[in-house]
Image: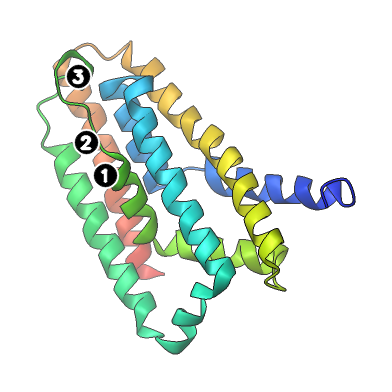
Amino acid sequence: MLAAAPSLYLSMAAFALAASITPGPVNILILSSGVHYGFRPSLRLVFGATSGFCLLLLLIGLGLHELLVIFPNLTTVIQWAGVAFLLFMAFKLATTSGELGKTRTDKGPSMITGALLQWVNPKAWLAAVAGMGAYAANGAPALVWEFTVLYFAVCFASVACWAYAGAFLGRFLNDAAHIRLFNRIMALLLVASAAYLIIT
């Protein structure tokens, strides 16, 4: 099918790139992880976030979105779970000591953290529904899988850019006071993301 409709796959890749590389709560956490723990350790969080979203995307394509139709209140539950998780992560960032984790034994956020944040992020659900609706509306399993695999590759590369940017920035933030300031700015951005979820 790739040879028959390359424009479709190009469009899928463009959608994945636009949805993955733009700023959002997951990318804020990954940027922060890059600053604190370096690029390689942050790839665990990158892999977790990418895998979590792509699993959601796949299940949406296979019919999980019907749950939102059957149980409309589920959207509200997801929204408030996302708000709580973002505020928790913001609190953790705002109260850190300002030491760089890559100089200690702490390995930073886990793959589970990245995956969980995607599953409690209403925007991730909307992006998954919109993506599958646009490119695999007929529910053909082969197309659902192809979109998911393509999305994984684009998403992983896009989100890894944020980890690399954080690792690069971390080279210039060797003072604990500057790290604390950076952490609090990131925490405020997460709080702003949580507020956005509440008012939309």
| Marks 2,1: beta carbons within 8 A | yes
Foreground pick, 41 / 98:
41
| Residue on which the image places disc 1 | 188
Furthest residue to the front? 142
| Residue on which the image places disc 2 | 184
Residue depth check, mark 3 versus mark 1: number of the one nearer the observer = 3
Foreground pick, 174 / 5:
5
Compared with 110, 78 (above or below) is below
Going 34% across and 28% down the picture, which residue do you hit?
42
Q: On residue 131, which mark appears?
A: none
Going 70% across and 71% down the picture, which residue do you hit?
137
Task: State the CA–CA distance, disc 2 to disc 1.
Answer: 6 Å
Residue depth check, mark 3 versus mark 2: number of the one nearer the observer = 3
Task: State the CA–CA distance, disc 3 to disc 2.
Answer: 14 Å
Q: Is residue 165 left or right of residue 45?
A: right
Residue type at mark 1?
A: Leu
Bin the neighbour count of mark 3 within 10 Å (Cα to Cα): few under 14, some 14-19, many 20 and up: many
Task: Give the secondary structure at mark 1.
Answer: helix
- Which percent across, then down, holds residue 165? 44, 23
Bin the neighbour count of mark 2 within 10 Å (Cα to Cα): few under 14, some 14-19, many 20 and up: some
| Marks 3,1: beta carbons within 8 A | no
Mark 3 or mark 1, which has the lower sequence index? 3
Foreground pick, 173 / 100:
100
Q: Is residue 30 left or right of residue 155?
A: left
Task: Give the secondary structure at mark 2.
Answer: helix
Furthest residue to the right? 4
| Residue on which the image places disc 3 | 100
